[in-house]
Amino acid sequence: MEMIKGYSHKPMGTVALAELMNSGIITREEVFISSKAGLLYGDISAKLPPMKYLSEQLENKGISIEDFSEYEGLFQTLNPAFYEIALNKSLENLGLEMIDVYYIHIPEITKLKLTEDEFYEKMEMLIRWYETKCFEGKIRYYGIAFEFMVEEPFENKWHIEIERIKNIARKVSGEKNHFKYILFEYNIMCDWADTVNSQMIDGVKLTMIEACKALELETVASMPFAMGDGFKKYALSDMLDFVSKKMNHVIVGSKNPKHIEEILRCWRGNLSECSGRQRFSGTDLVEIAKCNNVSKRTIYRYKAYYEEMKEAESEK
């Protein structure tokens, strides 16, 4: 759920959370709330699309279009002033005094437009803001929600060194810093975080999952069912089993209560072992993309779709 739009949180905060807590069914301590900030959205409650929202609600608070970097229609910023507005809006909509984890959403977009030093300088400014909010009690922990870096690990333009980010947090607040979580897509059809040595920790090349473990960062898997596409080839239990073996936490959800009940049954039962599958190298995948007119990003994310294509080509 995005923070600045001002509407995703409202039903949860004003209806679901309030009703459950007021009735005594749950306590605040039993609910772990996470959210993200960094992307420019409009405000549906005020009927403001993104650019109109920027001009009418943000510019008078010192935030301009120059603060954002754009990629494929997504506008991302590392300006702490934007996060301040987003955080307060989230807390208001949720009816809470604190959010448990507050992510920096897709910082790769801003990194794409800056030099290495400029990017990490902006990240340090933002981390200082985050640590202040943790000290104030408005945020318990913070982290980064990656997208392009994990989905396209062979594209150096997206690369961010999480060890360097962790060292910035240590510089700001020492070993007791609140940088604790890394969120990224990980599923049976997109497992780059466990197969590509994309991070360097103490001079050793590691996978994203290994690097997070070395830095004592909690890993959170998003899209465990590959946005629903995984069901075309795999059983629910296989997909949950695959993700839970490697990740500390998994974000699962559904609009259908029956699907949620099925997910809970799988978690409570004995998840089956996932069968082994062929893995392709980055070079193989790029060649498949060229032959089938498919973008590299699509190939990177859901390579399982193209296993049969590869096999068919080899049989010709």
Image: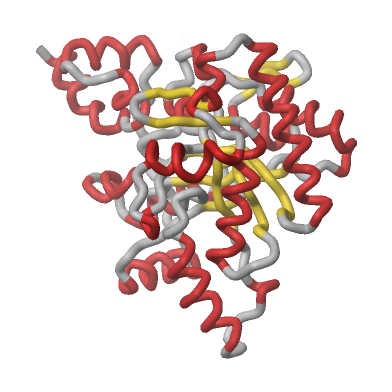
The total of numbered circles placed on residues is: 0
Q: Which residue is more in the foreground, 261 or 308?
A: 261
Q: Is 277 positioned to the left or the right of 21 in the image?
A: left
Q: Residue 133, image x and y in percent? A: 76, 49
Which residue is pictured at 53% across the width and 64% down the height? 93
Q: Which residue is more in the foreground, 147 or 138?
A: 138
Q: Looking at the rendering, in which quadrant would you find the C terminus?
A: top left
Which residue is pictured at 31% across the width and 17% down the height? 285
Q: Is 92 positioned to the left or the right of 313 in the image?
A: right
Q: Residue 305, image x and y in percent? A: 24, 32
Q: Quadrant of residue 137?
A: bottom right
Can residue 241 be seen at all in this image of the molecule? no
Q: Residue 15, image x and y in percent? A: 47, 77
Q: Quadrant of residue 310?
A: top left
Q: Is 44 positioned to the left or the right of 205 in the image?
A: left
Which residue is pictured at 14% across the width and 16% down the height? 315
Q: Is residue 282 above or below residue 248?
A: above
Furthest-left residue in this view: 316
